[in-house]
Image: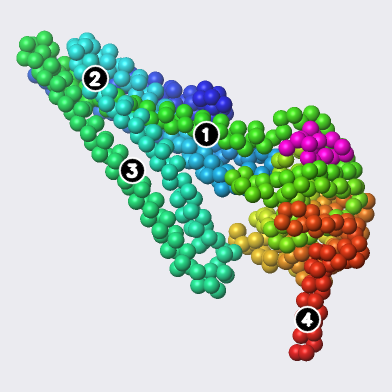
Amino acid sequence: MNMIKWTRYLLTGNLIITLGLISLIACFPVLEWIKFTQTQLFFDSITGTANTLVWIALILAAVQIADMSLHRVKGMLNERFSLKIGHKLQEYVLSLVEKTNSITTLESPKYREDLNILNNNISKTSEFINALITIVHQLVVVIIYVYLIQQFSWLVILVVFSFALPSVIYALNVANRNDRHFHANSQLQLEGNNIYGLLTHPYVQKELIIFSSRKFLMKKWKDAAYRLVNNNSKLLIKNANVGIAVDIFSPIGFLVAQMILIQKLMNQSITLGDYIAVTTSIAMLEGSLKTILLSTNIFKNYDLLVKRIKHFHTEYVENNNRKNTVLSCPEIKEMRVSNLSFTYPLQSAAVLRNINLKINKGDVVAIVGDNGSGKSTLAKIVAGLHTVPDGHLFINGIDMNDLDSKEYYTQIAVVNQDFVKYPLTIYENISMNEVGASDKNKLDLFVNKYPMLVPEQLRANMDVYIGADYLHSNQLSGGQWQRIAIARALYKDSPLLLLDEATSEVDPQTEADIVSLLLQDRKGKTTIIVTHNLYLTRQANQIIVMHKGEIMESGTFADLVNKGGKFYRMWASQNEAKMTTVAGMGAG
């Protein structure tokens, strides 16, 4: 999107306010012309009758009142315009993120930095719109004053414009300097914001209190904030020093213009009224020129914004969306991974290597392995959440990259180990959609079927908000939140369900009940379970054992136990730990 298209996008829906501002801008030249002529007349009539002077003074006062009132209205319209533009900008950023169909590049520090830089540039767009309106306003004022002054001396106009040129160079240098500064300090800003978020987040306080970590994090925040403030101060001082040097040119130009006018006054080629009116106009012209020239840096900022948007769109929308998507996604009957290796962006070591895997409709597949073995990454790839090259992931024999990914996602439900705690009602948390009366009836039936998923005390009023974000909302434990996340996935009733450590915060008995019930209800549908609890794998007809990014072994529970390999050792270790715990409890 180029500058013209971007401007048109921002102005869409703001036609009335735009026309109102243009109408106001058209009024200002008339007022300035009246002030000029009446000032000229006032001083030329200084020796005339008192009545004439009073009437001129009243006219000037009325014009001044009108000018102040119009500026007040213009300021109000500018504020409304900024509010609407701000909303539109947030909507646009969300629309960009919504277009991404892969989490591969989104789960990276580079994405956070690029988003931070984009948001910084976007936050200045309302400033650009206001500056653009101001520039148009001041250009009209400049034109009227040039017209008025040229009647007395073109040389004065040339002097004023010549001594204003350094401000243009200053403005452009400031824009480039500020952009380089923000790039250099983006990570520092993110560090300070993240630590501040931790220090104020309600769910983090329990650990900060227990581990007495507040002073430690406070120091880290102060260090980051101090460095950022110090760097920003250096930038401000540098800009101010250059600005002071540039400002010297303006009074020199005004002095030169005055010498020209005084010479004309002494030669009696202009009157005293002319001199005062033109002098006042020069001051106004200089002020308008300075406003325009100092605002020119906003065009540089705007150009940078367009480049940032293009970069973000290319990096996180175009590069992540499958360009050759042409086929509708059929019902998932077979999934096949072929010779797949996978490396996260900005990392050198592969997370997965030479993965070959086949999953048929109705299979219950358990993926197990040590921490960092790649089991969650493999599960997310199967779920289509990571972008992989052509020829490595097939659905019903069709390359995943040839399918409509959005249609594919309609057939999948996921419970992640880092599930999201949405500050919504229970109904909304489960349905993740607008909830009408018929929807509530359907949700009530679902909860009655899986009563262990929603706390009993909340079932009477599932319109209540949950979490600690809003007043009068109900707080839940980690295990209760996880059950809500499971309910959300089960309610979607998808052909493919991925449970990535989905029951890690639930007590063992409830965990066993949930998994048994859902597998019973999902007969004929595909379920993938990523787990450390090897007791759950007994209900799987295929177990995949991951080790250092590779599939070390696979088979049924009986096959792997009889094989005596990696899975057997894991099973024996977990069994021994459980027996030791039981024995210890008995001895107590």
Marks 3 and 1, how far apart at CA: 22 Å
Query: Of discs 3 and 4, which sits in the foreground?
Result: 4
Marks 4 and 2, how far apart at CA: 89 Å
Residue 83 magenta-drawn? no
Image location (x, y in percent) of residue 296:
37, 27
> Which one is earlier in the sequence, the residue at label 4 or at label 2?
2
Dot 4: element: helix
Marks 3 and 4, how far apart at CA: 64 Å
| Residue positioned most to the right | 524
Residue for point 45% across, 50% down: 188
- Residue type indicated by callout 1: Arg
> Which one is earlier in the sequence, the residue at label 1 or at label 4?
1
Image location (x, y in percent) of residue 106:
63, 44
Query: Of discs 1 and 2, which sits in the foreground?
Result: 1
Please tell me which residue lies in front, 472 or 521: 521
Dot 1: element: helix
> Which one is earlier in the sequence, the residue at label 3 or at label 4?
3
Query: Which mark, by number, is residue 308?
Result: 1
Which residue corresponds to mark 3?
A: 235
- Residue type indicated by callout 4: Thr
- Segment tinted magenta in the rendering: 389-404
Which residue corresponds to mark 2?
A: 162
Above or below residue 410? Residue 577 is: below
Which residue corresponds to mark 4?
A: 580
